Image (cartoon, coloured by chain):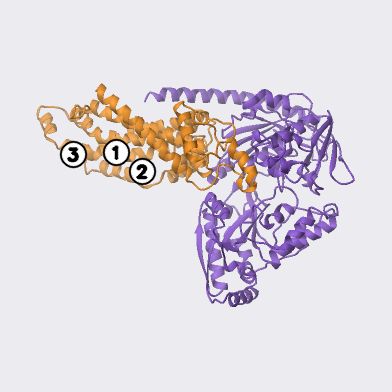
Chain colours: A purple, B orange
Amino acid sequence: MKNSKLVWLLSLLLVVGLFLAACGGDDDKEATKDTDEKEGTTEEPEVVADEEQVLNLIQTAEIPTMDSALVTDAVGFDLLNNVNEGLYRLSQENIAVPALSDGEPTVSEDGLVYTFTLRDSNWSDGTPVTANDFEYSWKRAMNPDTASEYGPYMMSGVIKNATAISNGEMEYTELGIKAIDEKTLEVTLEKPIPYFLSLMSFGTFLPQKEEFVTAQGENYAKNSESLLYNGPFTLANWDGTGLSWQLLKNEQYWDKETVKLTEINYDVVKETATAVNLYTNGEKDRAGLSGEYAMQYAADPELLTELETSVFYFKYNQERGGEKTPLANVNIREAISKAFNKEDLASVVLANGSTAAYSFIPKDFVFDEDGNDFRDANGDMAVFNVEEAKAAWEKGLSELGVTELSLEILGGDTELSKKMDEYFKSQLETNLPGLTITLKEVPFNVRLDLDTNQDYDIQVAGWGPDYQDPFTFLSLWETDGGNNQMSYSNPEYDQLLQDINGSLAQDIPARWEAMAKAEKMIVDQDFAVGPIYQRGLMFLQKPYVKGVIAHPFGGDYSYKWAYIEGK
Amino acid sequence: MAKYITRRVFYMFITFFLIATATFFLMKALPGSPISSASKLSPTQLAVVEAKYGLDQPIPVQYAKYMLNLAQGDLGNSFQFKNASVTDLIIDRLGPSMLLGTQGLVLGVAIGILLGMIAALRQNTIWDYGSTFVAIIGISIPSFVFATFLQYWLAVEWKIFPVGLWKDGWVSSVLPSIALAMGPLATASRFIRTEMIEVLSSDYITLAKSKGATGFEVAFKHAFRNALIPLVTVLGPLAAGLLTGSLVIEQIFAIPGIGEQFVKSIMSNDFSIIMGTTLFFSAFLIVVIFLVDVLYGIIDPRIRLSGGKD
């Protein structure tokens, strides 16, 4: 094989590269010492000066893109949150707090015009971040040539004219954002949006420097060199499609005193077994656990569990192929919602940190001013109760005039989904006499197709939030809404949705109440959907890793406050 | 010979064209869309994104455009990696896959041939049974089990090699190469053993022996060369498979190879990468099969390359 020569040359290059990388590592150590000596302004425990502030992490997928207008995935949003900064940022308590915005903006009487004053801050090339950088990037996200998915999705109905622009009725330059001067930014909304400021921490609303983006042209965001950063870290050594990259402390960041880590090394590892081996060997500081590994490490002292804000639920299709399904009967839906033991499902079948869901809005997601979780507004709904389930079932069957029913459950084709589906089948068939469940297990893409064509009876579906407000969940079931592929329609519910983002938009307590009412309606009165579980995450993390903040939406984690202690 | 080669090259192009066409239409029949948040967008918003990528055109038009670009060597841009050209991606990911494949193949075939010969020359002895045992292990244990086993013992417990990742230069390639070598090792040893036993009992071997050739001469000069032919036949596709990357091995050792990317592109409906990698794999296989056919003539002059009609 002639190739082998080339291949030897390649591996030689790799070895040389490794030496170079190793040399580079020493410089970083020096840098650590410097910053640690300066540090000490916060109330965080003092970091020992000679402790190496390096974090080694695993990511489970590659970075599809770092262009904030084009990012649609978890990895991208996670990184954007750490290498860039918008008007607001989620704090350690997961509350959106002013970041590049110098204090709270002034808001017009009608709640439509927000005027932000920007603090002095720089891009990683040393040039200042200006109001125009926001105007440019938001408009770029609405420009049809950019073909952004999240731009129109996040801005429509929020920023003035965004809906008209995305329908092609208006030029993207008409978007309701304007740089008054270098430091003053004026944003006009379509209607008052109570959660607008939390949106400002989302990746799609990050600034981009016009001169830089235009100069890069087609090459913009192609690799870590063709991007600018204004967040706690900068991205380095990313070639655009590779399996490894680094975050380095951004010396230009306005709040760099807070940032303690000097370096975060990422590698993409898709196998749980490999991730765990790397963790045990001490090469990585955190490893996600799935499937049997979650059970195996259940008692490990380094195991951590985190509740995510994704909720999984039965989606009851009321109309299939132009005909009403048995699920159009509310009693049948009620019976199914109450006929399976969710606690056992979460703790025994899933056993991955997930918890049973008795609501549609997840726990630990939205809080009111007094810190009350929205989750508690309605208490537990659709609780497992065989008697109630049976009663509703009998009633439903007699209304339909049948004694037996056969329904299909549409689920995913992963090991875990299959296990879960088996459990549903056995629980439902046992507790609801006369019910036969057939299982259909398909890959994700196929499930989406079947969902779009409304070709299923009961679907095991999930949803994660796009902004920190219950509305991101509630809006799914608007009559004829884009995600309502199950023919649920209740004029009362539609009215509530209208009020929530209309007449009640500025009356926070009344809005809160209306949202709670809407949630009760879909989960406990109409049984439009049957909540199953809220997804949890189990992972191993070295005890010396401190201060990593997990977020309920947008980027998954912040490393701005993270540090290494006692390694 | 020249005529034969010209004709073969012509057929190779036809094959390639057919593969490209079939893949294109099959791929378009896949459920789902390469636009990851399609379900969140309104129809007009979705139309804007689709127009940008030319997905709004009828499929025959998309096909014609693709083939025209392909003729100019342009494989297009990836959908999942916004901004990344498919050609760059394949080139970047090919290096590690090629290195592992080559090492695995060379190692596996070399040891396999050795084991096969020992088994044939020492038929029905402990040597024979030993080599059969190794071959059965190689065939029956899936490479991912073997890879996990290697990773656990040699990397986690004994710390001789890295657990995975493509960071420690050549050392990183050792475990995955060994894991990949098991398949070809088993195949090679079985083929060589069977063939050698057959060849060793043929008339010309008896003649060679009676003319005073030593056992060593008989084994290497006469028997081995003839036993190679069937091995060469299976080696072609085997090599193509190994060199273009193994999904499982690359995933277990977290190696940035092409095999892993191939499967991922199908899952995410990344049309341009599906096409790019499929075409690359096919081209590779087509060329390897061609080379194998040419090699036959060199190993065994009895196989005539110019067809009967000419």
Instruction: Say which of B78 and A342 sits in front.
Output: B78
Mark 2 and mark 3 lie on one chain; the one further toward the N terminus is: 2
Residue corresponding to mark 3: B198
Q: Residue at x 64, y 59 (%)?
A: A533
Q: Quarter of the image holding residue B19?
A: top left
- Which residue is label 1 attached to? B189
- The secondary element bearing badge 1 is classed as helix
Q: Viewed as shown, does residue A245 lie left or right of A466?
A: left
Q: Is residue A442 above or below residue A209?
A: below
Quarter the C terminus of chain A occupies: top right
Q: What type is the residue that disc 2 sits on?
A: Gly
Quadrant in the picture for residue A351: bottom right
Whether labels 2 and 3 share one chain? yes
Task: Say whether disc 1 or disc 3 marks the residue closer to the N-terminus.
Answer: 1
Task: Left or right? Give the position of A64 relative to A176.
Answer: left
Q: Are marks 1 and 2 in contact (CB under 8 Å)?
A: yes
Where residue B138 is drawn, which disc sits there? Answer: 2
Q: Chain of mark 2?
A: B
Separation (CA) of disc 2 from disc 3:
23 Å
Quadrant of the drawing holding the N terminus of chain A: top left
- Most foreground residue, B65 or A512: B65
Q: Chain of mark 3?
A: B
Does label 1 or label 2 sit earlier along the sequence? 2
